[in-house]
Amino acid sequence: MEVQVDGIMPEEKTNLVMKFKCKKCGHSIAMLTNKFETEFVSKLGVELGGATGVSTAPMATVSSSLAQAKEELKKTNPEDDLIWTEEALKRIQRVPFFVRGMARKTVITFAMEKGATTIDAKLMDEVREK
């Protein structure tokens, strides 16, 4: 598989463009990212391509960098340690879907600031009164 490496991680960080081509059949596939995806990939420290135009494992660097970043994200997500009681889960499900994410985040932030490990109805009442 050939990989086009010209223009990868452009300085202006607007778009990331890659082209993959099968050596057997000649079929090409292009990958285009938008400005925000390109910035995200750049901040992860992903380096695509290599010293040569064709690499035996063109996505090896991407794979290892993303795996490392995934592990770092797991370490920095303390909200996964919070336990939701059945009643709290039922109450958060009654919140309209278009604001449920924000309500959930507010409850989680409050619980973490307070040092709580369990989110229950009492804690949700405290958030509402706040």
Image (spheres, rainbow, N blue to C red):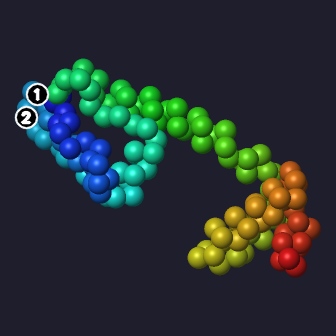
Nearer to me, 107 or 48: 48
CB under 8 Å between discs 2 and 1: yes
Q: Is residue 121 above or below residue 44?
A: below
| Residue type, mark 1 in image | Lys
Residue at the spot 40% in from the left edge and 52% down from the top edge: 39
At mark 1, the secondary structure is loop
Q: Image quadrant for the N terminus?
A: top left
> Hey, which quadrant is residue 85 in on the image?
bottom right
Q: Is residue 67 above or below residue 36?
A: above
> Hey, which quadrant is residue 70 in on the image?
top right
Horizontal and vertical percent for residue 97? Answer: 61, 74
| Residue type, mark 2 in image | Gly
Horizontal and vertical percent for residue 124? Answer: 84, 69
Name the side, left or right, on which 58 lies relative to 21. right
Q: Is residue 25 above or below residue 109?
A: above
Q: Which residue is mark 1?
A: 23
Q: Which residue is mark 2?
A: 26
Horizontal and vertical percent for residue 43? Answer: 45, 45
Q: Residues within 10 Å of mark 2 (few under 14, many from 20)?
A: few
Residue at the spot 43% in from the left edge and 50% down from the top edge: 40
Distance in Å between CA atoms under marks 2 and 1: 6 Å
